[in-house]
Amino acid sequence: MTNALVVYESLFGDAHTIANAIAAGLSTTMSVTVVDAREAPDEFGPDVDLLVVGGPNHQFGMPRPRTRGQAERQMEAKFPSTHDGLREWLHRLHQGGGVPAAAFDLRLTHPGFLHHLDHASGQEEELLRDHGFDVIAPAEHFAVVDTAGPLQDGEVDRAKAWGATLATAFASNRQGVSLA
């Protein structure tokens, strides 16, 4: 059986919800494990056939310890860790050996937000490629209404559909075709 690993960082719960929806879409054709980046293994064996990673945008990129701390103070929240997340996990991750991968992010949708600037998913894709993973599909972006959520209506269904699309991309990649 084909196995996918979905690794996410979620500060307010929305990225976790999206990761589970992506997993639901993938699970139509493969076995899927969803894990928080703080608990993800730094190395995995040949049983992982597809890696999907994602999380929120913080100041136009992946969260960092400083931006997590700022969000914690600004939102008067308490996160399990401000020092460890998806960025740090991707830096620790051992070489991917060509394992197919994909990335997603969450971003604000209000009119004043600068959508054209680089976002977390671009950095995630770069780190995946730097570690020898084969990015097989363009990153997907999911919308939150405000910093602490909620998700925009319809995003969970869109994430599930994207997961199913990734499953198709994975099957095509096995036949030598890439959607990226």
Image (cartoon, rainbow, N blue to C red):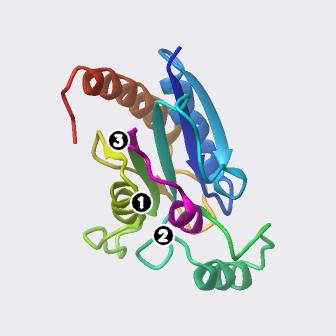
Q: Amino acid at mark 2?
A: Met
- Give above or below for 4 relative to 155: above
Residue drawn at x 76%, y 71% as measured from the top left: 81
- Quadrant in the picture for the C terminus: top left
Q: Earlier in the sequence, mark 2 or mark 1?
A: 2
Left or right for 82, reference 52:
right
The CA distance from mark 2 to mark 1 is 8 Å
The CA distance from mark 1 to mark 3 is 16 Å
Within 10 Å of disc 1 (Cα), the crowding (few <14, some 14-19, many 20+) is: many
The residue wearing badge 2 is 62
Q: Quadrant of residue 6?
A: top right
The residue wearing badge 1 is 124
Q: Residue furthest left?
A: 177
Residue drawn at x 60%, y 59% as measured from the top left: 149
Q: Nearer the viewer, residue 58 or 150?
A: 58
Left or right for 37, reference 57:
right
Q: Amino acid at mark 1?
A: Glu
Within 10 Å of disc 3 (Cα), the crowding (few <14, some 14-19, many 20+) is: some
Q: Nearer the viewer, residue 67 or 150?
A: 67
Q: Nearer the viewer, residue 112 or 130?
A: 130
- Give above or below for 98 relative to 157: below
The residue wearing badge 3 is 98
Q: Earlier in the sequence, mark 2 or mark 3?
A: 2
Q: Nearer the viewer, mark 2 or mark 1?
A: 1
Are circles 2 and 1 on residues that touch, CB within 8 Å?
A: yes
Q: Is residue 141 on the magenta stretch?
A: no
The CA distance from mark 2 to mark 3 is 23 Å
